[in-house]
Image (cartoon, rainbow, N blue to C red):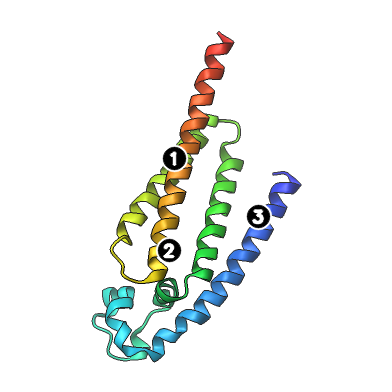
Amino acid sequence: MSFKTIIQLCIASMFLVFSTLVAWYEGSSILNTPWEWRYTAIFSEIVNGPVMQADDILTIDYFVYAAKFTAIFPLLMLLSSTYIIILLGYVLFKRNIKKYSYFLSCIGVIFLVLSVLVSSSPTIGLKIFFNCFLLLGILLIVIALLRLFNLTIFRKQML
């Protein structure tokens, strides 16, 4: 792994840690809004059943609340973690363009599925996430297809 890659990983990891801590803090306001527990404490309801008091809320639901109502830092979490995953995929598959393109297209499909899952949300934060998931999914699939198409043209020229 080159020095440039390590620097990029360190910077993206710092962004991820910082944005995670801030999103965690922002999402902790769910403890003070009991009328939102029914709609936002999704994971707590799956694990513990109906949420009756603030102690029943799991930490992961803090991030759901932050994504729904204050989307800036959860969005930074998404972008920095996506950058880290794509960079690690590049390091793993840099010798094989075809595998890297498949890797990118798989991530793109995951983002498209996530965009479908949050598409019906009425909150502004999840509408932003819908647009971001959709844009990233389409962008990654187009990049993967262009890389594969470029590889095919390059191979035909070599023959």
Q: Is residue 155 above or below residue 78?
A: above
Could you tell me residue 99's position as x and y percent? Answer: 49, 33
Residue position marked by numbered label 3 in the rendering: 9
Q: How far apart are marks 3 and 2 (CA)?
A: 26 Å
Q: Which of marks 3 and 1 is in front?
A: 1
Residue position marked by numbered label 2 in the rendering: 128
At horizontal 27% and vertical 73% (from top left) the residue drawn is: 46
At horizontal 52% and vertical 31% (from top left) the residue drawn is: 147
Could you tell me residue 49's position as x and y percent? Answer: 24, 80
User: Closer to the N terminus: mark 3 or mark 1?
Assistant: 3
Q: Distance between the residues labelled 1 and 2?
A: 20 Å
Viewer-proximal residue among 60 and 28? 28
Circle 1 SS class: helix
Residue type at mark 2 is Ile
Q: Residue furthest left?
A: 50
Circle 2 SS class: helix
Viewer-proximal residue among 73 and 98? 73
Looking at the rendered image, the quarter that the C terminus falls into is: top right
Which class describes the residues within 10 Å of circle 2: few (<14), some (14-19), or many (20+)? Answer: some
Q: Residue furthest top?
A: 159
The answer to whether marks 3 and 2 mark residues whose Cβ atoms lie closer than 8 Å is no
Looking at the rendered image, the quarter that the N terminus falls into is: top right
Could you tell me residue 10's position as x and y percent? Answer: 68, 59
Viewer-proximal residue among 158 and 88? 158
Specify the label residue 141 is tagged with.
1
